[in-house]
Each structure stands twice: as C-alpha cells, then as structure tokens.
Amino acid sequence: MAEKQSLKPPSGEPSIRVVMMPRDTNAEGTIFGGVILSLIDQAAYVEAVRQQHKRYVTISFNEVEFHEPVFVGDVLSLYADGTRVGRTSLTIHVRVCARRRLDPDQNVKVTEADVVFVAVDDDGKPTPIFGD
C-alpha cells in the first residue's frame, strides 16, 4: 500500500505581492473584483506547484466575499497555504491583504478563498498528485 503524502507546511511568505495600478480600476475608482480573482488563482497556483510540481487546472473557487475595497497604489499580498490533498486534487486557501498607499501602517484583509486544482497529464486527464 502506498504511503499517504502530506502537504508542506505554510511558507509564511506571500505567494504574490503586487501594486494595484490605474488600469485595474472599475467605474467606481476601485480595483475590479475580477482582477483580484485572477490574482487569487495565480497565488493558489504558485502554492500548488510548491506543494508538488505538476500541471494543474483550476476546477473551482469557493464563495468569495469582498470585505474591503482595494484602491490604486495599494499593495496586495496574497498568502496561500495548502489545506487538503486528494488523489488528483489539491485545495489551496488564499488570504488577500491590502497595505494602504495613503497609510502604509494600515493592512486590511480584503477577502479569502479556497481554490481547488486537479493535476492533469499531457492529455488533460486527471493524474495522481503523488503517484499511485
């Protein structure tokens, strides 16, 4: 019987850190939610590959609720940690924080999400993350 593989511990470092730019704003002058969702997907992928180097595709996001707006010049830090590993799937929890441009001491939680990936082979078929 194969030994069960476990997830690596959290790194404690952001998977991504990025300054929000004017091109990312909506008509209300805040950053588009879709831009943040894209960054969440990218941060989760960075963590998935850190857990086990494979080719992954995003299968789902859980509910994403925005608690605070993000403004031009804010620095977003996205922290990602593996929370569950299955045979072919991997769940990554991503927490998004914004350091305010106008008050660098203010760091607020913007949102968080769980992203589920499936490891796939060259034909796009699910493949075991840690082998059979």
Image (cartoon, helix red, strand yellow):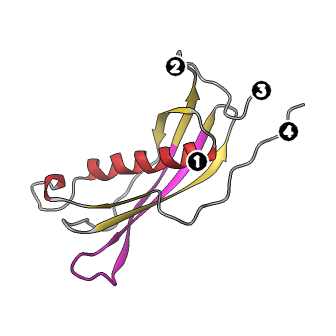
Task: Assign a secondary structure to mark 2.
Answer: loop
Q: Which residues are magenta?
A: 90-115
Front of the two marks 2 and 1:
1
Task: Assign a secondary structure to mark 4.
Answer: loop
Q: Amino acid type of disc 4? A: Glu
Horizontal placement of 115 versus 10: left or right? Answer: left
Q: Amino acid type of disc 3? A: Asp
- Tell me which numbered mark, 4 or 3, is placed earlier along the sequence: 4
The residue that label 4 is drawn on is 3
- Tell me which numbered mark, 3 or 1, is placed earlier along the sequence: 1
Characterize the local packing of mark 1: few (<14), some (14-19) or many (20 or more) Cα atoms within 10 angstroms: some
Q: CA distance from mark 1 to mark 4?
A: 20 Å
Q: Residue 16 lies in magenta, yes or no?
A: no
Tell me the chief SS of the magenta region. Answer: strand
Please say if the residues under marks 2 and 1 sit with CB atoms less than 8 Å apart: no
Q: CA distance from mark 3 to mark 1?
A: 20 Å
Please say if the residues under marks 1 and 4 sit with CB atoms less than 8 Å apart: no
